[in-house]
Image (spheres, rainbow, N blue to C red):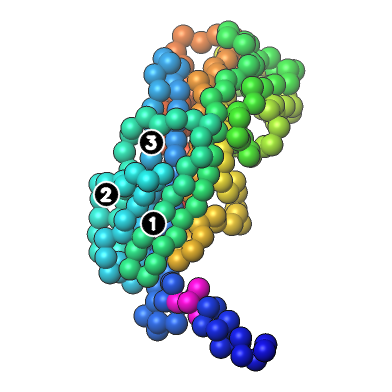
Amino acid sequence: MLLRKLPALAGGIFLVFSGCRQFDPNYSEPMINGYLYRGEFYDYSVEYERYVEVFDNHGLRMVPVVVLNNETLDAFYYTWTKYRYGDTMAFPVDYIYELEVTHYWGRAGAKVRMPGNFSLTTPPEGYILDRDSTLFISWHPSVGAEWYWVEIDIEYDYRDTLGGEDDWSFHLDTIVKDTFLMISPERVFPAFVADVLEGDGSAMVWSGCGPAIESGDKGNIKGCGFGFFNALNEPREKYFYVGAPIQMRRCPDIKMVKERVLGRLVRRFSQ
């Protein structure tokens, strides 16, 4: 009886794999990458972005169809090897999003949950970071978040141990699972800093779902394709002073950092 069933089983297995036509010598699996982004700026304005890229170095034999929760996205850029889709339409948070891409060789996709809105709790407005102080960044939990990406920028003027004056900058970006981050004064203020004159700092946090943005992370696209699909939510940033208040902000604002962060996503996709 088992022997009689083997041909049928083999046929079923063949159908599963041939859905991507992997036995075709010309088969080329496309790279599919994208993200959902929501960001709230210091002036309380909110920005949304939906982005998906389909890339095949051997050439795309048809215009890929990109569907997000049953909504077909429009292409805004294309070449014979690459199509980009998306827009800046608002969308709900704390919600499941399913991406499906149909191309010449079959279908691929992924599912993520857009993390809920949250806010940073510390440092407080007008906070001054002293040379001997530990910087404590904290935030409310974001519903559905799998990790948090924290970026800290600090820049200040100082007087060194020999009496000379100069400026110093400190930058940190890291992935954490907690809802706080502590940075010791030794990391921000090197030993040659004798006195901090004035400066400022910024703290920005993204809640994320999907593969964490770290080296060696594994993509979540399944089916006839590979790549990453992420959802990121960023609340209003926090600014603080270093040593003493300054007249003009020097640290980057959220709009500048957003371009850097999303650019890093795209660069990861292209590797």
Residue 60 spot, x, y in % from top left? 30, 66
Residue 222 in view of the camera:
yes
Q: Amino acid at mark 3?
A: Glu
The answer to whether residue 29 is above or below residue 263 is below
Residue behind mark 1: 101
Residue furthest toward the bottom? 3
Q: Quadrant of residue 168?
A: top right
User: Which kind of residue does numbered mark 2 sit on?
Assistant: Ala
Can residue 228 be seen at all in this image of the molecule?
A: no
Classify mark 3: helix, strand or loop.
Answer: strand
Q: Residue at x 37, y 70 (%)?
A: 105
Residue ID for mark 3: 49
Range shown magenta: 14-18
Helix, strand or loop under label 1: strand
Q: Earlier in the sequence, mark 1 or mark 2?
A: 2
Mark earlier in primary sequence (3, 2): 3
Q: Main secondary structure of the magenta part?
A: helix
Alpha carbon distance from label 3 to label 2: 14 Å
The picture places residue 33, in percent across and down from the top left corner, at 44, 53
Quadrant of res 36: top left
- Classify 10 Å Cα crowding around label 3: few (below 14), some (14-19), many (20 and above): some
Say the numbered circle drawn on residue 177: none
According to the picture, the residue beneath numbered tag 2 turns out to be: 75
* Outermost residue toward the front in this view: 1
Q: Residue at position x 31%, y 51% from top?
A: 84
Q: Nearer the viewer, residue 205 or 31?
A: 31
CA–CA distance in space, label 3 to label 1: 18 Å
Q: Amino acid at mark 1?
A: Val
